[in-house]
Image (cartoon, rainbow, N blue to C red):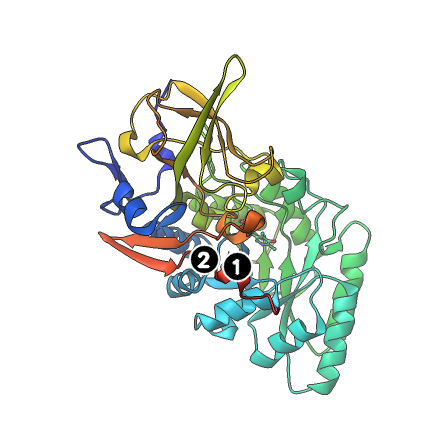
């Protein structure tokens, strides 16, 4: 069976003369020895060029969806490359501010923002607030009574009634949704009226139809609905959210950032959106997923005759819950022989006390896989570390950024003492 498709490796990954994986010039097996496993390795220049591609495709105002992967280094990188940053909780806001990103570059999201979150956002002057409910409008109204000096810039989030072809849990544009105001029911129009009577600056409209979307037709449908909502309004911005899909496994191919931008701009023009309205987006996955690889160590291999072979590693659902949550697929390979044929099918599992703790269901690996091997899963930069947990009290892995032959630890590995830091007695 075929070797790992090279397009699933990050831009600066290569294979050396011995067949071993290098990332930004560094031997992946050396990185595993230096930092231990499990280990998240991000190709920094790949992250940077993806962020730049987003700015090129959409211009100023395009925001990195921080929930996909957030630490201070990542927030700084996105900001340095010209992106704004989406946050949807006080926690994400705290980390991004700690990274030194100015509040004016932030976009506050959330379907249930608390009074404290809204007050803080108003106080520090976040660049944009995406309003999601009538209760939130009431809260903003109350807060502004006490602060008549403020004129926050807000966008209204609507549900356009578009069903993107993706997993139900990450589909957000349909009518039955906890997010936004429904266009079809008239709630969106009512919310716009209310916002216009408040002391806010209603700069635009926003929708987010879901995640891991390959077919750009869904975004074209979304733009058509948004254009209809704002046709008589004087707005500055139309934000289409995130959701651009990326290839995780063989034979998948997502649109490029440039194709995505061009498609939605053309759809906006076709729908009669004025040329001076900024079309913006909020990519998360497509910035970070393809830039990272996770390394694990194989600890046990069980051949169940006539059933399957299990290869168990030193991480699992605590560092990558996507297979458990969404049934997501990944590829797997051995960094010591990247281009080897993968003739053995194994179920790659973690070390957690659950049968569902699967990382790759039918992973293909070389026949000579052995206990002690370093094994890799590519395209793990999004919704892995950010959704990581301490289940079974497994410490979370470190995050290393590699660039031009240098490796930089940006988040250290948790220790077992870290697991006790919240216990008060
Ligand atoms: C999750 C999310 C995004 C990012 O989605 P990706 O699929 O990671 O690009 C953008 N906007 C909103 C409102 C989101 O909830």
Counting from the top left corner in percent of width and height, residue 82 is at: 41, 63
Which residue lies at the image location 32% right of the left edge and 43% below the top edge? 11
Residue placed most toward the observer, 416 or 245: 416
One can see residue 174 in this view: yes
Q: Secondary structure at mark 2?
A: loop
Q: Could you say which is closer to the camera, residue 372 or residue 88?
A: 372
Query: In the rendered view of the protein, which quadrant contains the N terminus?
Result: top left
Q: Are there few (<14), some (14-19), or many (20+) residues within 10 Å of tag 2?
A: some
Is disc 1 surrounded by few (<14), some (14 to 19) or many (20+) residues within 10 Å?
A: some
Tell which tag, 2 or 1, sits nearer the viewer: 1
Q: What numbered label is drawn on residue 414?
A: 2
N-term-proximal mark, 2 vs 1: 2
Q: Is mark 1 within 8 Å of ligand 1?
A: no
| Secondary structure beneath label 1 | helix
Q: State the residue at coordinates (63%, 44%).
A: 170
Please state which of residues 290 and 329 is positioned toward the viewer in this rendering. Answer: 329
User: Along the line of sight, which residue is nearer the eye, 162 or 332?
Assistant: 332
**In which image quadrant can residue 128 be found?**
bottom right
Which quadrant would the C terminus be assigned to in this image?
Answer: bottom right
Q: Position of residue 414 (x, y in %)?
A: 45, 57
Residues marked 2 and 1 touching at CB (< 8 Å): yes
Q: Position of residue 131 (x, y in %)?
A: 69, 65
Task: State the residue lying farthest toward the top.
Answer: 306
Q: Which residue is denoted by mark 1 in the rendering?
A: 419
Is residue 107 at least partly visible in the picture? no
Return the x and y of residue 167 as percentages of the image width and height.
Answer: 63, 37
Above or below: residue 150 compared with residue 216:
below
Residues at marks 2 and 1, CA–CA distance in whole angstroms: 8 Å
Q: Is residue 164 above or below residue 142?
A: above
């Amino acid at each position: 069976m075929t070797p790992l498709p090279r397009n699933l490796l990050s831009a600066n990954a290569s294979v050396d003369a011995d067949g071993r994986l290098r990332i930004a010039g560094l031997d992946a097996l050396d990185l595993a020895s230096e930092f231990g496993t499990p280990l998240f390795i991000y190709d920094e220049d790949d992250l940077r060029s993806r962020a730049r591609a987003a700015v090129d495709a959409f211009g100023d105002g395009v925001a990195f969806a921080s929930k996909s992967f957030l630490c201070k280094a990542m927030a700084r990188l996105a900001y340095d490359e010209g992106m704004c940053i989406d946050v949807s909780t006080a926690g994400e806001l705290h980390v991004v501010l700690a990274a030194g990103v100015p509040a004016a570059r932030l976009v506050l999201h959330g379907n249930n923002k608390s009074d404290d979150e809204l007050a803080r956002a108003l106080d520090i002057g976040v660049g944009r607030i995406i309003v999601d409910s009538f209760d939130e409008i009431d809260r903003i109204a109350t807060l502004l009574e006490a602060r008549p000096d403020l004129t926050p810039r807000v966008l209204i989030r609507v549900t356009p009634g578009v069903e993107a072809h993706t997993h139900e849990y990450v589909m957000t544009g349909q009518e039955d949704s906890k997010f936004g105001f429904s266009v079809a029911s008239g709630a969106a129009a009512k919310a716009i009226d209310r916002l216009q009577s408040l002391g806010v600056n209603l700069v635009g409209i926003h929708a987010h139809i879901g995640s891991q979307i390959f077919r750009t037709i869904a975004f074209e449908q979304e733009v058509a609905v948004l254009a209809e909502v704002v046709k008589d309004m004087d707005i500055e911005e139309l934000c289409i959210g995130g959701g651009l899909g990326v290839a995780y496994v063989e034979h998948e191919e997502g649109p490029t950032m440039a194709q995505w931008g061009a498609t939605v701009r053309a759809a906006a023009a076709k729908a009669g959106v004025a040329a001076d309205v900024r079309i913006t987006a909020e990519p998360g996955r497509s910035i970070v997923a393809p830039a990272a690889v996770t390394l694990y160590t194989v600890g046990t291999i069980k051949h169940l005759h006539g059933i399957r072979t299990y290869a168990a590693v030193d991480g699992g659902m605590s560092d990558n819950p996507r297979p458990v949550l969404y049934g997501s697929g990944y590829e797997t390979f051995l960094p010591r022989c990247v281009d080897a044929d993968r003739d053995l099918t194994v179920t790659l599992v973690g070390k957690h006390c659950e049968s569902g703790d699967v990382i790759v269901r039918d992973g293909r690996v070389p026949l000579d896989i052995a206990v002690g091997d370093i094994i890799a899963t590519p395209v793990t930069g999004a919704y892995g570390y950010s959704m990581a947990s301490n289940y079974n009290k497994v410490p979370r892995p470190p995050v290393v950024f590699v660039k031009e032959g240098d490796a930089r630890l940006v988040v250290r590995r948790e220790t077992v003492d870290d697991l006790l830091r919240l216990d008060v007695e």
